[in-house]
Amino acid sequence: MKRFSVLFVFIFEPFIRGLSVIFSVLSPSHYLTFERKLRGSLYGFFFGSRKLSVGRVVFDGADKISLGHNVKLYCDSKYIAGTNGQITIGSDTHIGFGSVVSGGGGVDIGERCAISSSVFFYSVSNDVGIGKSLANKSIVSAPIKVCDDVFIGAGVVILPGVVLGSHAVIAAGSVVTNNVGPGQIVAGVPAKSISK
């Protein structure tokens, strides 16, 4: 499997980039979307759409995961799109060791984002309504959107439906339950603005 993964990268990455160059001439505004979808589809086709492990990085639902240029995914991280989800990671973004992106409700991470280790994105979660029995709890599913140039510190948890505006900073150990505006700095459990 490891040898095949390496061959895939050396053979198909130039092929993907070549097709993207052609597509960029035909439709300049959509070529990155095309390239991400092509890369995710090829990975899903060759490695099976359910699960792909490259080194110690796990992709579950690889055909529903799209990566931009120069994305760095560090070891022991997991990307779970499932059967109905979607995960998109923009160019020049890195995601640290031990992070989990649960994209059943959709996760869209922008370009040039710095995401530290042990960060958890949960686009699907249990409804924790007070007074309800566990048997009657429903599932909450809502997309997470991380705009460009966002910094997320170690150990952050991001819950369903959250939008992080461009240039936002999320302090280590925060639990983000609400939207964060562009350029805003938040910290705490739950995360609150500490911007001046």
Image: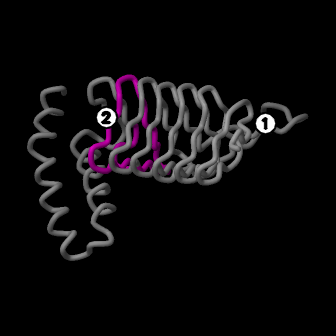
**21 relative position to 124: left or right:** left
Q: Residue at x 38, y 43 (%)?
A: 93
According to the picture, the residue beneath numbered tag 2 turns out to be 52
Q: CA distance from mark 2 to mark 1?
A: 32 Å
- In the rendered image, the quadrant that contains the C terminus is top right
Q: Residue furthest right?
A: 131
| Pointer 1 residue | 128
Relative image position of residue 161 (x, y in whole percent): 64, 50
Along the viewing direction, whichever of 132 and 117 lies nearer the viewer: 117
Which residue lies most toward the bottom here? Answer: 26
Question: Mark 2, residues whose alpha carbon is within 10 Å: few (<14), some, or many (≥20)?
Answer: many
For mark 1, give the secondary structure. loop
Queried whether the magenta region covers residue 65, the answer comes back as yes
* Comes first in the chain, label 2 or label 1: 2
| Residue 74 placement (x, y as % from top left) | 35, 28
Q: Quadrant of residue 169?
A: top right
Q: Which portion, as a residue range, is magenta?
A: 60-88
Spot occupied by residue 11 in the image (x, y as percentages of width and height): 9, 44
